[in-house]
Image: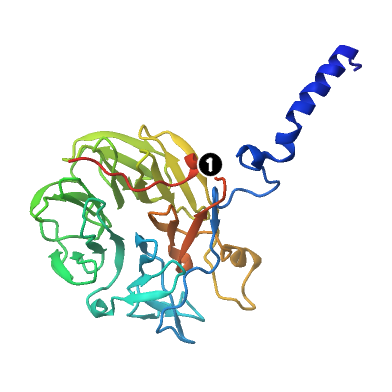
Amino acid sequence: MRLSPVAVVLALFVLSACAPADLDPALEGGEVSVKGGTDETGPYDVVPQWQKPAKNHDDTWTWGVGASVVADTPDRIFIVTRGDVRKDDPASGDRRRTNYVVVVDRNGNEIENWSQWDTMLVAPHSIAISPYDPERHIWIQDNTRQQVWKFTNDGQLVQTWGEANVIGDDENHFNGVASIAFLPDGSVLFGDGYVGQRVVKYDADGEYVTEWGANGPMPFDHIHALAVDSQGRVIVADRDNSRLQVFTENGEFIEEWPNVRRPNSIHVDAEHNVWVLDGRAGMGRLLKYDEAGILQDYWGVGGGVCVPAGPQRSRVEASTCAPGAMSNPHGISVDSEGTLYIADYNNNRVQKFVPKPGADPARLVGQPLLLSD
C-alpha cells in the first residue's frame, strides 16, 4: 500500500514525538518492558539460597519442610519446620527433633532458636502474629499434638488451648487444628481442620464463644487457612473441596468461591486484596482475588519435589530447585518493607521475594489488613 504525502508527514511527526519515550521509558518513570520470560516470580526478584543453614546443621542434617513463616520485622523472620531431615535423603522419613522454630535476619542467618520447646512440639503447622497486638505475641498451631500456643515475642509460653495428644471436638480439644485468624476486638478463630472440620471462636481472654463447620449447610473438607477481610467476613480455605467459603464472624454462611484447586494460605492486605497460595501438584502459584472473589492476577511456577544432587536427579527435578520455583507453597508473610516470604513446603525452604524496581504496585502483596474495632 502506498501512502500519500500528507500521511507520510503525519507518520513522521507521530514517530518523532514518541521517539524519546520509546528509546528510554525510564525517563518517564514507566516500567521498562523485558523480552522473554514467563513471569515465574511476577513483580518480584527472588533472593537465591536466602535461607542459610541452622547453627546445628552438619553433614547429615538439614532443613525439614517449610511449614510456615511470619515476619515480625524485616530483620526478624520466624520460620517453622517439622524438624530436620537427612541431607542425602530428605524423603527417607528420618527426622531429627530440632529447629522447629528458628528466627532469622534479613539475610537468612539464624539469630534465635526456640529449642526450649523442641520436646513439646511435634508437627507445628503454622505460625502467626496478630496485626492488632502491640506486644507481638507469637501463635503456633500443632495439628498432631492437637494444641495451640500463645507465646511472648521472646518465647515465653503464655497460654495453651487443647490437651496434648488427645483428640476431641469440644471447646478445649481438637482434631488437627492447623490455622488461625484474628479480629480487631482481640478474639481469635482456630481452624480445627485436618479432621475436625470446624472453625472455633474464642474471645480476647481465650474463652470459648462459638463454632461452626461439620454440621453446617456447607461442610468442610480440610480447613487449611483462615483470614478476615475488610468487611469483617471470615474466609476459610476449604482445601480438599477446592474452594474458599465466606462467613460472618459468627459462622453464618455467605458464599463460596469455587475452583481454587488447593488453597493453602490466605493473606488479606490493606488494599482489600485477597491473596491465596495454590499448592496443587505441579503448580505453585500466588493468586490475587478481589473481595467479590474475582481473580485479578497470578504468578508462580511449580513442579516435582526438589531432590538432592546426584546421578538419579532428572532435569525436571533439578529445575524445581531453582530459585522461585515452588512445590506445595504453604505459608505467606509480608514484612514492613514489602518483602514477601513464602514457605515452600516440599522443597524444605522458605523463599524471599523482593519487589522489582518499577514493579506495578497493583501486583505486589500489601501490608496486612487492619480493621478498626
Q: Can residue 4 be seen in this view?
A: no
Q: Position of residue 202 (x, y in %)?
A: 13, 51
Q: Can residue 168 be seen in this view?
A: yes
Q: Which corner quadrant of the image does residue 372 belong to?
A: top left
Q: Where is residue 54 in the image (x, y as percent from the top left)?
A: 41, 78
Residue lying at the far bottom of the rendered structure: 59
Comparing 40 with 345, the one in front is 40
Q: In which quarter of the image is the N terminus?
A: top right
Which residue: 11% across, 50% down? 203
Q: Where is residue 87 in the image (x, y as percent from the top left)?
A: 49, 80
Task: Tell me if residue 132 comes above or below residue 173 in the rendering.
Answer: above
- Left or right: where does residue 289 sit relative to residue 39? left
Residue carrying label 1: 360
- Left or right: where does residue 122 sit relative to residue 201? right
Amino acid tagged 1: Asp
* Local SS, label 1: loop
- Left or right: where does residue 50 sit relative to residue 251? right
Label count reads 1
Q: In which quarter of the image is the C terminus?
A: top left
